[in-house]
Amino acid sequence: MPTCRTLPPLLGLILLGACGDRADDTGHGGAPGDAGHGGQTDGGSEPAVESDCEDGADDDGDGAIDCEDSDCADHWSCNLPDSIRYDTVIDFWGNTITCELVGIEYDVEIGDCHTVGGGPLSRIEDPQQTCADCDRTYQGPLTYTQDTCSSKLGQPLPSTATLGLVFLNETQRELFAPDDQWNWYSLGILELVDGVYTLSTSEDIIIDPEGCDNGKQNIGTIDLRVDIEDR
């Protein structure tokens, strides 16, 4: 595979931990989601229980707000995970491109690659390493059960991963990853399926291949699947 001068977001995810060891928690109190226990009122009096576990108010007047109230003990927003299991499958499907060099054109076939990896990630709170727009940031070691992509990239895959999550509601989470300058970008929405939060996405890789004089080309497509399970 030609060397990339600038890695697009999905290709950068393959090198997820290569940016350095960084971590997260910005103090977000959980993203908007479903309301908490349905409070009951009696003729306009204060609700008998905390009626909304995410509104920042003491709904039942007992001095405890949201997750501090025992009424919210079982609410999803008060039970965000301190550790997760992260797994990913990366498939790159290469194209045949036409490379022009000093006026000579020739075809270059870009090979496919397949990588499977993952590992346990734990919550981090170092302000130097966290995703400012996320509810929690996680970091941990990665291992690979299959890998042919590192040879295509010409460099080893990362040994650690750092990811940010925004907890949208009980069944959806938004996944964030850092680029090589530690600018965080969204990879998309994870959907809960059979106890696992899953995201599948695809991106064409358009770069200016090294050794070719004819500019940017679509060298192939990356298909990415991410699975995250609470631990």
Image (cartoon, rainbow, N blue to C red):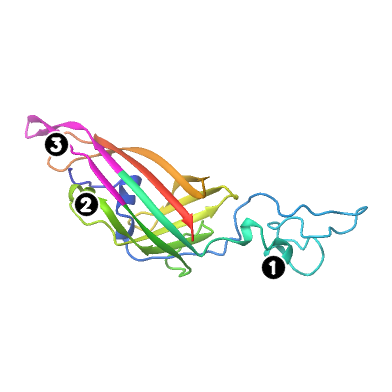
Observer-side mark, 2 or 3, equals 2
Q: Are there few (<14), some (14-19), or many (20+) residues within 10 Å of tag 3?
A: some
The residue that appears at 47% across and 64% down in the rendered structure is 24
Numbered label attached to residue 77: none
Asked if marks 2 and 3 touch (Cβ < 8 Å), the reply is no
Q: 224 above or below 178?
A: above
Q: In which quarter of the image is residue 41?
A: bottom right
Q: In terms of secondary structure, where does tag 2 sit?
A: helix
Residue bearing mark 3? 213
Q: In which quarter of the image is the N terminus?
A: top left
Numbered label attached to residue 68: 1
Q: Where is residue 143 in the image (x, y as percent from the top left)?
A: 30, 59
Question: Magenta part mainly helix, strand or loop?
Answer: strand
Observer-side mark, 3 or 1, equals 1
Q: Does the stretch in magenta take in 85?
A: no
For the record, the magenta segment spans 91-116
- Residue at the front extreme of this rendering: 194
Q: Are there few (<14), some (14-19), or many (20+) residues within 10 Å of tag 1?
A: few
Give the mark, 2 or 1, whose residue is nearer the N terminus.
1
Alpha carbon separation for disc pair 3 and 1: 62 Å
Alpha carbon separation for disc pair 2 and 1: 47 Å
Alpha carbon separation for disc pair 2 and 3: 25 Å
- Residue at the right extreme of this rendering: 43
Residue bearing mark 2? 150
**Side of 184 where 114 appears, left or right:** left
